[in-house]
Amino acid sequence: MDDFLRLSASTGRFTYGAPRAFSFGDDGRLLWFLRSTGPTDAFDSLWVLDTATGTETLLADPRELSPEPGVLPVAERRLRERIRLVAAGIGSYALSGDGRSAVFALYGRLYRVRCEGGAEGWDGPEEIPAAGPALDPRPNADGSRTAYVADDALHTHPGGRVSPADGARWGLAEFAAAEELGRDRGHWWSPDGRTLLAARVDESALQRRHFADPAHPELPAEDFAYPEAGGPNAEVQLWVLGEDGARVRLDWDAARYPYVSDAGWESPTEILLTVQDRLQQSVLLLTADPATGRTRELSRTEHPHWVDPLVPGTPARLADGRMLTSADTDGGAARALAVDGKLLTGDGIQVRRVAGVHQGRLLIEAGQRDPSEQQVLLLDPATGELTPLADGPGVHGVHACAGTLLLTSADADGVRRTVRTADGREFVPGDLSAPLPYRVVPVLERVTEHGIPTALVLPRGHVPGRRLPVLMDSYGGPGYQDVSAEPRRWQQRQWWADRGFAVVTVDNRGTPYVSPAFTHAVYRGFSEVTLDDQVAALHALALRHPDLDLGRVGVRGWSYGGYLSAMAVLRRPDVFHAAAAGAAPTDFRQYDTAYTERYLGLPQDHPDVYERDSLVPDAPNLVRPLLLITGLADDNVHPSHTLRLSQALTDAGRPHQLLALPGVTHMTPNGIREKITALELEFFRRELA
């Protein structure tokens, strides 16, 4: 590897040493976070910043607690894959309701840190006895009890096992919820700290998928339950588990609304839950009585295609009792907020997150200008009036508690964080990450009649008039925005450009944050819209930038981006001349239910849609160089996707290259992605020479 790739690998793509996972506690006095000791340290420790003094305190160092890195419980390893958590050490933590104590898991062992008084009142980490290798600990309101999961059962300490031994998995989110629905937890303490709301997950109807490590044939294969499109889902129930062994099941029409995308306690006497039908065209907000389990509908959102995921921070009750929910404006021009069903925001703003309440107004993250940017705004829930709080160029975010704010701003000059207290003082949490090697200002343009966001990165010092091979580097799928002012995502693209490429990134229709209508354009079909928009955007950019050599166009991508890359050379060899396709879902009939059916419907109802979007039948059409890459431990896009396409290409007599990586997961951590990139560079230099 060259110097940049080596630096990227050793610094976790420039994230090691950067503070993350911020949470306010103790009415805003404490700001908890995770951070490693420096730019090449992968092991995150638990820290706190006292906003009364600005002092940072190290609370728990994973290497002191476990000098030799341990083995993650299988359930935790899979949960980390679901939430894309790559950090080692303390991966996450949870605060008590008063925000004065935290619990975390470390290699299956549980620990608690408490603050008993002022700045000097921190106790050292205390190990919590657990019934077995444990994960996802959650403290109650005052930190006196901790709930956790071990061996698919929900336990508390003190207390013991609280879920029945009925063969189900208790206290964890099922695959569909964690991977696709935005719910990565499965148990919640009541506000009084005495009762638990818990998910019961029955996966017995699901097929089993297997992994075998070909580098270690002596080891047994690993298997897990997987909800394949058109097949059965896990059965999910919610139960209230009381101190005295009482159990109450929440009652809703789970046959019609099987997905639980959100749940939690609103008060000691009310639970709010959001449920969806299988195709996610109807979403219900329910209130539940924890004493009886009876539920009542508060609101219903319907869409003929699908209802977009909830805006984070919704649903929520306002101080006056009214209900804040997500909504779309008429015609699908904007993702909006509504109060008791009445729109509060309009077409000029794309709401992305509700961060809380500040100075009597809602604190929101939203896009008001170009989709690549994000602003922080105050929203008056009575009038809808907007007041900018952080709206300069770039991507701005916020956390808030009791008048204290943590503002994060990201632009071409890097990432900056500032704590601003209610009385006007400011602190900067320490950032020990490596400085970004490049200051990248991509050329951002909206093209075609659809206003497709695009970005162009040229070599530093590029001389106009010098023709450059083009490297298309896009994701292109629902749920992820590539063209953003966040600076870290452009570092590797600048490296590619400096290797002699014009790097083009396109957010085709189907991607988020332009408008709901823009996103919904892929309904009942990924392939045609995705590929047509990529081609149209490339041609539009070439008209504006004549140094783009359309006679030499490569395309690379991972996951949906790998699907796009393989599809590009299989279906449009007149435009694309070589492709590197990583972890590509080559046939969505073998992908998961919640993601695939949201966009394509059920395969038994729409077999033509699934056939059109499958790449396997295109194998005989390959005439361009294709490098297929897969991790053999990928439990998201199973390696069978890549291997089936490779088999079809082999059967059709079509030469191609296959890179199969033993032990590598979908996230390709620990420098694997950089090693793959070095091989891709050799491939494209050879094929686009």
Image: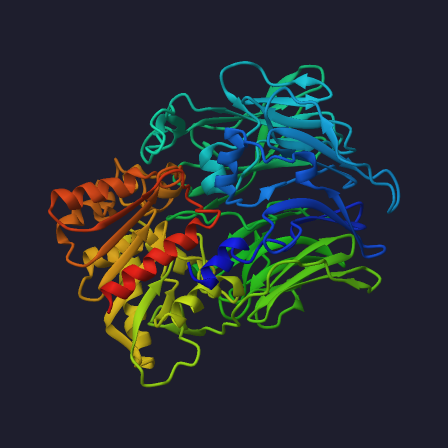
- 281 lies above or below 12: above
Q: Residue at x 44, y 69 (%)?
A: 494
Residue 214, above or below 26: above
Q: Seen in the image, is 656 located left or right of residue 486?
A: left
Say if 225 sits above or below 319 in the image: above
Q: Which residue is drawn at 30% across and 61% down?
A: 682
Measured as percent of width and height from the top left, residue 466 is found at: 31, 82
152 sits to left or right of 573? right
Looking at the rendered structure, the number of numbered marks drawn on it comes to 0
Where is residue 39 shown, x and y percent of the image? 61, 56
Identity of the residue furthest to the left in this view: 653
Q: In this view, does 298 lie to the left or right of 461?
A: right
Q: Which of 373 and 19 is in front in this view?
A: 19
Q: Which residue is drawn at 48% across and 28% down?
A: 253
Q: In which quarter of the image is residue 605?
A: top left
Considering the image in quadrants, where does the C terminus appear?
bottom left
Q: Nearer the viewer, residue 363 or 322?
A: 363
Nearer to the camera, 508 or 160: 160
Q: Position of residue 676 (x, y in %)?
A: 37, 53
Measured along the vertical axis of the image, is residue 175 above or below residue 608? above
Q: In this view, does 391 lie to the left or right of 420?
A: left
Give the residue at x 22% y 44%: 645
The N terminus appears in which quarter of the rendering?
bottom left
